[in-house]
Amino acid sequence: MDNVDQYVQLAIELAIEYAPQLILAILTLVIGMWIINRVLMFADKSLQKKFDPTLTKFVHSLASVLMKALLLISVASMVGIATTSFIAVLGAAGLAVGLALQGNLSNFASGVLILVFKPFKVGDVIEGAGFVGTVREIQIFTTVLMTFDNRKVIIPNSNLSNNPLINISAESTRRVDMKFGIGYGDDIDKAKGVINSLIEADSRILKDPAPVVVVSELADSSVNITVRTWAAAEDYWGIYFDMQENVKKRFDEEGVSIPFPQRDVHIYQETQ
């Protein structure tokens, strides 16, 4: 019976000694969680106005984990739990994980830079890492492209942020460059007139900047005429393909030749 009384007395003493710390720790935990949730809500509203939703969600998750981990460590120290060794173990584990995931960390950092600085966005047509396509998704580690022949390409973000990249959709207008060759015996002015008439007939081609039709090269077997026109980005390929066909048809109608490589083969018969 005396032992029971001693245990009860010890429990009462411990409760009296540690109750204030425990109550303070519980209050700190509750109030801290409330503050963290409020901070995250405010941060979400601010980030959603300026950045991509993917980045907003990731920052929310990362900030939530970090702040809650710091809160739990603080609460643990308040109730007398030694946190020094625990922090050292977490640091060592973090270093080991970081070394093992160097490539992924590089892709992650590149993904954040892409989402923040926006060299391209979802819906843009880009050329990078050896592929051309429309950006379907920008994720933290990878970017998803859909090529023009409907193939899905997943590219690590570091390949896009650390190498030259062309954003084809960055501007609303593009210059359509074309080259047509005519024979040395053909009338240059007549060929240029045919091309200019086709340009004037195409309403998709912009008047400003003015189209350019010039002789650019006296090649081995042809006189090359360079054509430069401006158009809305979405009309680029339509104009390019239509001009190739229309110029060929009109040249045929007007008697303007388009040279192509030819080779003469001479056979000599040796006599004995």
Image (tube, helix red, strand yellow):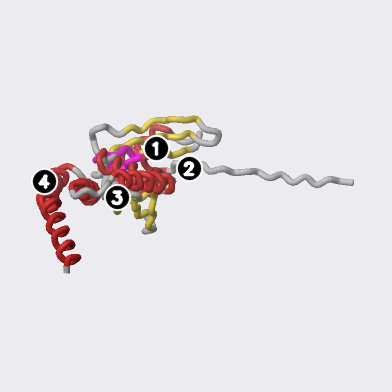
Q: Name the side, left or right, on which 268 lies relative to 112.
A: right
Dot 4 lies on which element? helix
> Residue 180 placed where, x, y %?
43, 39
First in sequence: mark 4 vs mark 2:
4
Is the Cβ of the residue at disc 4 closer than 8 Å to that at disc 2? no
Few, some or many C-alpha atoms within 10 Å of disc 2 (few <14, some 14-19, many ≥20)?
Answer: some
* Residue at 43% across, 48% down: 100
CA distance separating discs 3 and 1: 18 Å
Q: How many marks?
A: 4
Mark 3 vs mark 4: in front: 4
Dot 2 lies on which element? loop
Q: Amino acid at mark 2?
A: Ile
Q: Amino acid at mark 4?
A: Phe
Is the Cβ of the residue at disc 3 closer than 8 Å to that at disc 1? no
> Residue 48 placed where, x, y %?
15, 47
* Residue at 27% across, 32% down: 210
Mark 4 vs mark 2: in front: 4
Q: Name the side, left or right, on which 101 lies relative to 267.
A: left
Where residue 164 is drawn, which disc sits there?
Answer: 1
> Residue 23 placed where, x, y %?
10, 52
* Quarter of the figure with residue 152: bottom left
As displayed, is residue 153 above or below residue 98? below
Few, some or many C-alpha atoms within 10 Å of disc 3 (few <14, some 14-19, many ≥20)?
Answer: many
Q: Which residues are magenta?
A: 165-176
